[in-house]
Amino acid sequence: MLLRCTGYGAEELDEKVDAIFQELHIYEELSPGMTVVLKPNLVMTSKPEEAIITHPALVAAVGKCVQRAGAKVLIAESPGGPYTPMTMKAAFRGCGYTDMAEACGFSLYTDCESREVPLPGGVRCRRMAIVSPFLGADYLIDLAKLKTHSMVGFSGAVKNMFGAVPGLKKPELHCRFPEKPEFSEMLLDLCDFLQPDLCITDGIWAMEGNGPTGGTRRDLGVLAASKSPYAVDVCCAKLAGLEAGQVLMLRYAAERGLVPQSIDGLELLGDSLESLSVPDFQKAEASSTDFIDRLPRFLRPAAKKLATPYPRIEKKSCVGCGKCAESCPQNTIEIKDHKAEIDYRRCIRCFCCHEMCPKHVIEIRRLRLFNV
């Protein structure tokens, strides 16, 4: 279901979210006493107008609909970096969720407990640590942000489930699956295990360019919803100028039979995709360079190394906070003389440093020859 939504005013959001709940028969699936876990995207502490996080006003509107059915609301998330009660409380507060939750009567999960569990249907990953509320939820609502992504190209409902992995366990998974295909399959394994019951993607203020944290806000004015995280991502990727086959997560999801191979196989409700689309949605600079596959085989390794984008620290603006070193799965970053330095010999180009830099001073660069 695609809906035009012009902003984050409470009245308009309440109307649109209520329409989603009615059209997709969500009220019928909820019951009094049920605990509904809301999973927003709070990748890092930021203001809602930066379009990095799921806007708290949307979360409030969804939670109110849940309460209308007599169910209880629990908001749970694990941003990057250490996952402790102190850091989680600070993240909720810094993103505007603490005041919102208090005003609405929602609970915020700050116990920060997790456990490692098997993923019985996992194709690439068979075991993973998961934050506890996601393992015992009566009902799970995935509240993603529509963004480009420097590693996997697109971030939506499937990628949002990566926040169910506790804090510094995320870099471990980047280290286990450093290549884009394997990492994408791992994300699918995780999403298929958690199986969110409802997915609503916040594309009112989306992010284009070098997302998920260093891009530019693009006012799309769109809410997208589905009971399938894969279906809603196919639609939202299209809004971002990407076909499903260009996003490995969605290509593999189609191969697993989780979603049709194109948007033509989906039933679309609400507003038309054409009426919501915008021209020239900017992709992440770290998108793959397709021409390499057309080179002679013996040239491909060297060409790939040259063409692969890399993170570059703007030393003059770096404050030496250490967030990049903390998030680096290969431990390739050191703080020297209050500035971060990258050892490129061990860098796997996962761009965790770019994603977690609070000052946005880590750029994604490629050699000028390949900057096309």
Image (cartoon, helix red, strand yellow):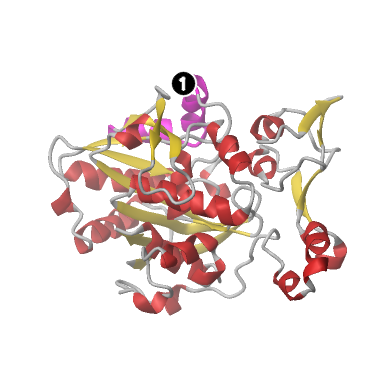
Q: Is residue 100 magenta?
A: yes
110 shown above or below 9: above
On the picture, is 133 further left or further right than 364?
left
120 shown above or below 238: above
On the picture, is 23 further left or further right than 86?
left
* Residue at image point 83% right, 60% down: 302
User: Where is residue 66, by image quadrant?
Assistant: top left
**Badge 1 density bin: few <14, some 14–19, many ≥20, Cα 10 Å:** some
Residue 35 location in percent, x, y?
Answer: 23, 36
Residue 56 location in percent, x, y?
Answer: 42, 43
Q: Which of 284 and 15 is in front in this view?
A: 284
* Residue at image point 33% right, 32% down: 133
> For the image shown, how many numbered marks are present on the structure?
1
23 shown above or below 193: below
Q: Which of 272 and 176 is in front in this view?
A: 176
Residue 283 location in percent, x, y?
Answer: 63, 64
On the picture, is 141 further left or further right than 248?
left
Magenta span of residues = 84-105
296 shown above or below 63: below
Q: Which of 333 and 278 is in front in this view?
A: 333
Residue that mark 1 sits on: 85
Residue 277 location in percent, x, y?
Answer: 49, 74
* Residue at image point 43% right, 62% down: 253
> What amino acid does circle 1 point to?
Pro
* Residue at image point 48% right, 27% down: 88
